[in-house]
Amino acid sequence: MSIRDLINILPEPLRQRALTHPSVADPYDSNGRLEFLGDSVLNSRVAELVFHGYPEFLEGDLTRIRAHLVRKSFLATVGRGEAIEENIESSVINDSVIADTVEAIIGAAYLIDKELVFRTIDEIFNPSEVDTDELRDWKTLLQETLQAEGLRPTYRVQAKHGPPHRPSFTSAVSVDGREVASGEGNSIKESEQTAARAALEILGVRPVARSTVEVHVGA
Protein backbone atom coordinates (compact mmCIF):
# COMPACT_ATOMS: atom_id res chain seq x y z
CA MET A 1 0.00 0.00 0.00
CA SER A 2 1.26 3.48 -0.84
CA ILE A 3 0.14 7.08 -1.16
CA ARG A 4 0.31 6.64 -4.94
CA ASP A 5 -2.21 3.81 -4.64
CA LEU A 6 -4.56 6.37 -3.12
CA ILE A 7 -3.87 8.88 -5.90
CA ASN A 8 -4.64 6.22 -8.51
CA ILE A 9 -8.21 5.71 -7.28
CA LEU A 10 -9.08 9.42 -7.42
CA PRO A 11 -11.34 10.54 -10.27
CA GLU A 12 -10.95 13.97 -11.84
CA PRO A 13 -11.41 16.71 -10.76
CA LEU A 14 -10.88 15.34 -7.23
CA ARG A 15 -7.37 14.16 -8.09
CA GLN A 16 -6.37 17.58 -9.40
CA ARG A 17 -7.82 19.33 -6.36
CA ALA A 18 -5.93 17.05 -3.96
CA LEU A 19 -2.64 17.89 -5.68
CA THR A 20 -3.19 21.65 -5.96
CA HIS A 21 -1.89 23.91 -3.22
CA PRO A 22 -3.93 26.99 -2.19
CA SER A 23 -1.03 29.23 -3.26
CA VAL A 24 -1.87 28.67 -6.95
CA ALA A 25 -5.65 28.25 -6.99
CA ASP A 26 -8.94 29.42 -5.54
CA PRO A 27 -9.46 27.98 -2.04
CA TYR A 28 -12.39 25.89 -3.28
CA ASP A 29 -10.34 24.49 -6.17
CA SER A 30 -7.30 23.62 -4.06
CA ASN A 31 -6.57 21.04 -1.37
CA GLY A 32 -7.12 22.97 1.87
CA ARG A 33 -10.46 21.36 2.70
CA LEU A 34 -9.19 17.90 1.75
CA GLU A 35 -6.13 18.43 3.94
CA PHE A 36 -8.45 19.18 6.86
CA LEU A 37 -10.33 15.92 6.28
CA GLY A 38 -7.18 13.88 5.74
CA ASP A 39 -5.57 15.23 8.90
CA SER A 40 -8.64 14.21 10.91
CA VAL A 41 -8.83 10.74 9.34
CA LEU A 42 -5.10 10.13 9.81
CA ASN A 43 -5.07 11.23 13.45
CA SER A 44 -8.16 9.20 14.29
CA ARG A 45 -6.89 6.00 12.66
CA VAL A 46 -3.40 6.29 14.12
CA ALA A 47 -4.89 7.01 17.55
CA GLU A 48 -6.82 3.75 17.27
CA LEU A 49 -3.69 1.85 16.17
CA VAL A 50 -1.69 3.23 19.09
CA PHE A 51 -4.53 2.61 21.56
CA HIS A 52 -4.74 -1.08 20.63
CA GLY A 53 -1.00 -1.48 20.17
CA TYR A 54 -0.02 -0.22 23.61
CA PRO A 55 -2.63 -1.34 26.17
CA GLU A 56 -0.20 -0.70 29.05
CA PHE A 57 0.37 2.99 28.18
CA LEU A 58 -1.63 5.91 29.54
CA GLU A 59 -2.91 9.04 27.78
CA GLY A 60 0.31 11.07 27.84
CA ASP A 61 2.47 8.36 26.29
CA LEU A 62 -0.21 7.44 23.75
CA THR A 63 -0.44 11.09 22.68
CA ARG A 64 3.32 11.35 22.20
CA ILE A 65 3.44 8.18 20.09
CA ARG A 66 0.58 9.36 17.89
CA ALA A 67 2.17 12.79 17.45
CA HIS A 68 5.46 11.14 16.49
CA LEU A 69 3.78 9.00 13.84
CA VAL A 70 1.81 11.83 12.18
CA ARG A 71 4.45 14.58 12.46
CA LYS A 72 4.90 16.79 9.40
CA SER A 73 8.51 15.75 8.83
CA PHE A 74 7.51 12.09 8.55
CA LEU A 75 4.61 12.90 6.22
CA ALA A 76 7.05 14.80 4.01
CA THR A 77 9.45 11.85 4.06
CA VAL A 78 6.64 9.55 2.97
CA GLY A 79 5.68 11.92 0.16
CA ARG A 80 9.26 12.42 -1.07
CA GLY A 81 9.83 8.67 -0.91
CA GLU A 82 7.12 8.27 -3.54
CA ALA A 83 8.14 11.42 -5.48
CA ILE A 84 4.76 13.02 -4.80
CA GLU A 85 6.33 16.46 -5.23
CA GLU A 86 6.52 15.82 -8.98
CA ASN A 87 2.71 15.94 -9.16
CA ILE A 88 2.05 18.86 -6.83
CA GLU A 89 1.00 22.23 -8.23
CA SER A 90 2.29 24.91 -5.87
CA SER A 91 4.19 28.19 -5.91
CA VAL A 92 6.83 26.50 -3.76
CA ILE A 93 7.70 22.90 -3.00
CA ASN A 94 8.94 22.22 0.51
CA ASP A 95 8.36 19.69 3.29
CA SER A 96 5.33 21.56 4.62
CA VAL A 97 3.61 21.59 1.22
CA ILE A 98 4.40 17.91 0.63
CA ALA A 99 3.11 16.92 4.08
CA ASP A 100 -0.09 18.92 3.57
CA THR A 101 -0.59 17.28 0.17
CA VAL A 102 -0.18 13.79 1.61
CA GLU A 103 -2.95 14.61 4.08
CA ALA A 104 -5.10 16.00 1.26
CA ILE A 105 -4.61 12.79 -0.74
CA ILE A 106 -5.68 10.75 2.28
CA GLY A 107 -8.75 12.95 2.68
CA ALA A 108 -9.69 12.69 -0.99
CA ALA A 109 -9.22 8.92 -1.08
CA TYR A 110 -11.31 8.58 2.09
CA LEU A 111 -14.27 9.94 0.14
CA ILE A 112 -13.83 7.15 -2.43
CA ASP A 113 -12.60 4.06 -0.55
CA LYS A 114 -12.40 4.22 3.23
CA GLU A 115 -11.12 0.66 3.66
CA LEU A 116 -8.21 1.23 1.27
CA VAL A 117 -7.28 4.37 3.18
CA PHE A 118 -7.34 2.50 6.49
CA ARG A 119 -5.16 -0.32 5.12
CA THR A 120 -2.70 2.20 3.72
CA ILE A 121 -2.48 4.09 7.02
CA ASP A 122 -2.08 0.83 8.93
CA GLU A 123 0.91 -0.12 6.78
CA ILE A 124 2.70 3.24 6.55
CA PHE A 125 2.05 4.53 10.07
CA ASN A 126 2.80 1.31 11.94
CA PRO A 127 3.26 1.93 15.68
CA SER A 128 5.60 -1.07 15.94
CA GLU A 129 8.23 1.04 14.14
CA VAL A 130 8.33 3.57 17.00
CA ASP A 131 11.07 3.50 19.62
CA THR A 132 8.71 4.12 22.52
CA ASP A 133 11.52 4.32 25.06
CA GLU A 134 12.66 7.54 23.41
CA LEU A 135 9.17 9.05 23.59
CA ARG A 136 7.90 8.09 27.01
CA ASP A 137 7.72 10.66 29.79
CA TRP A 138 9.51 8.65 32.45
CA LYS A 139 9.47 11.51 34.98
CA THR A 140 5.69 11.75 34.87
CA LEU A 141 5.30 7.98 35.10
CA LEU A 142 7.60 7.85 38.13
CA GLN A 143 5.79 10.74 39.80
CA GLU A 144 2.36 9.19 39.25
CA THR A 145 3.62 5.84 40.55
CA LEU A 146 5.06 7.36 43.72
CA GLN A 147 2.05 9.59 44.35
CA ALA A 148 -0.02 6.47 44.92
CA GLU A 149 2.27 5.80 47.91
CA GLY A 150 2.21 9.38 49.14
CA LEU A 151 5.76 10.01 47.89
CA ARG A 152 7.34 12.23 45.27
CA PRO A 153 10.70 12.18 43.47
CA THR A 154 13.29 14.95 43.66
CA TYR A 155 16.09 15.54 41.17
CA ARG A 156 19.58 16.94 41.56
CA VAL A 157 22.27 17.62 38.95
CA GLN A 158 25.36 15.74 40.09
CA ALA A 159 27.82 16.70 37.38
CA LYS A 160 28.37 18.46 34.09
CA HIS A 161 30.89 17.07 31.62
CA GLY A 162 32.27 17.82 28.18
CA PRO A 163 32.94 21.00 26.20
CA PRO A 164 30.61 24.04 26.44
CA HIS A 165 29.20 23.45 22.95
CA ARG A 166 28.30 19.82 23.72
CA PRO A 167 27.81 19.29 27.45
CA SER A 168 26.72 16.10 29.17
CA PHE A 169 24.86 16.04 32.47
CA THR A 170 24.43 13.48 35.24
CA SER A 171 21.33 13.77 37.42
CA ALA A 172 20.20 11.75 40.42
CA VAL A 173 16.64 11.06 41.55
CA SER A 174 15.81 10.57 45.22
CA VAL A 175 12.70 9.28 46.95
CA ASP A 176 11.98 10.05 50.58
CA GLY A 177 15.49 11.45 50.97
CA ARG A 178 17.18 8.35 49.54
CA GLU A 179 18.97 8.39 46.20
CA VAL A 180 17.44 5.71 44.02
CA ALA A 181 19.09 6.08 40.63
CA SER A 182 21.06 8.36 38.34
CA GLY A 183 21.16 9.01 34.62
CA GLU A 184 23.07 10.86 31.94
CA GLY A 185 21.95 13.00 29.00
CA ASN A 186 22.86 15.86 26.71
CA SER A 187 20.63 18.18 28.73
CA ILE A 188 19.45 18.36 32.34
CA LYS A 189 15.97 17.34 31.22
CA GLU A 190 17.29 14.32 29.33
CA SER A 191 19.46 13.22 32.26
CA GLU A 192 16.48 13.46 34.60
CA GLN A 193 14.36 11.37 32.23
CA THR A 194 17.11 8.74 32.14
CA ALA A 195 17.33 8.75 35.92
CA ALA A 196 13.55 8.38 36.25
CA ARG A 197 13.56 5.47 33.82
CA ALA A 198 16.33 3.77 35.81
CA ALA A 199 14.39 4.36 39.03
CA LEU A 200 11.29 2.72 37.59
CA GLU A 201 13.33 -0.33 36.63
CA ILE A 202 14.80 -0.54 40.14
CA LEU A 203 11.34 -0.17 41.69
CA GLY A 204 10.04 -2.86 39.36
CA VAL A 205 7.20 -0.83 37.88
CA ARG A 206 8.43 -0.25 34.35
CA PRO A 207 6.21 -1.98 31.75
CA VAL A 208 7.86 -4.98 30.16
CA ALA A 209 9.23 -4.16 26.70
CA ARG A 210 7.89 -6.11 23.76
CA SER A 211 9.81 -6.92 20.59
CA THR A 212 6.75 -6.41 18.40
CA VAL A 213 3.44 -4.63 18.61
CA GLU A 214 0.39 -6.58 17.54
CA VAL A 215 -2.45 -4.37 16.40
CA HIS A 216 -5.92 -5.64 15.62
CA VAL A 217 -8.23 -2.88 14.46
CA GLY A 218 -11.47 -3.38 12.63
CA ALA A 219 -11.80 -1.37 9.41
Image (tube, rainbow, N blue to C red):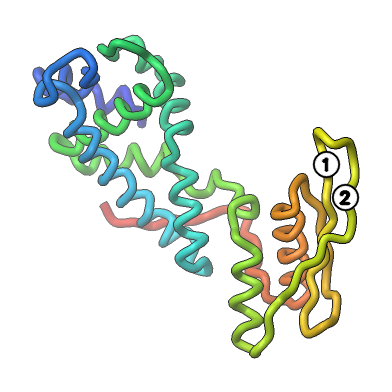
Q: Are marks 1 and 2 in contact (CB under 8 Å)?
A: yes
Residue situated in front as seen by the camera: 108 or 117 = 108
Q: CA distance from mark 1 to mark 2?
A: 7 Å
Locate the N terminus and report the quarter of the image it occupies.
Answer: top left
Residue 126, above or below 48: above
Q: Amino acid at mark 1?
A: Pro
The answer to whether residue 81 shows anywhere in this view is yes
Label 2 crowd bin: few (<14), some (14–19), many (20+), radius 10 Å: some
Q: Residue furthest bottom?
A: 150
Position of 34 with respect to 202 (left or right) is: left
- Indicate the secondary structure of the residue bearing disc 1: loop
Label 2: state its secondary structure. strand
Q: Which residue is denoted by mark 1 in the rendering?
A: 167
Q: Is residue 2 above or below residue 147?
A: above
Q: Quadrant of residue 166?
A: top right
Residue that lies at the very extreme toward the front in this rendered image: 164
**Which disc, if any, is residue 160?**
2
Instruction: Give the residue displayed 80% in from the left and 75% down from the top.
Output: 174
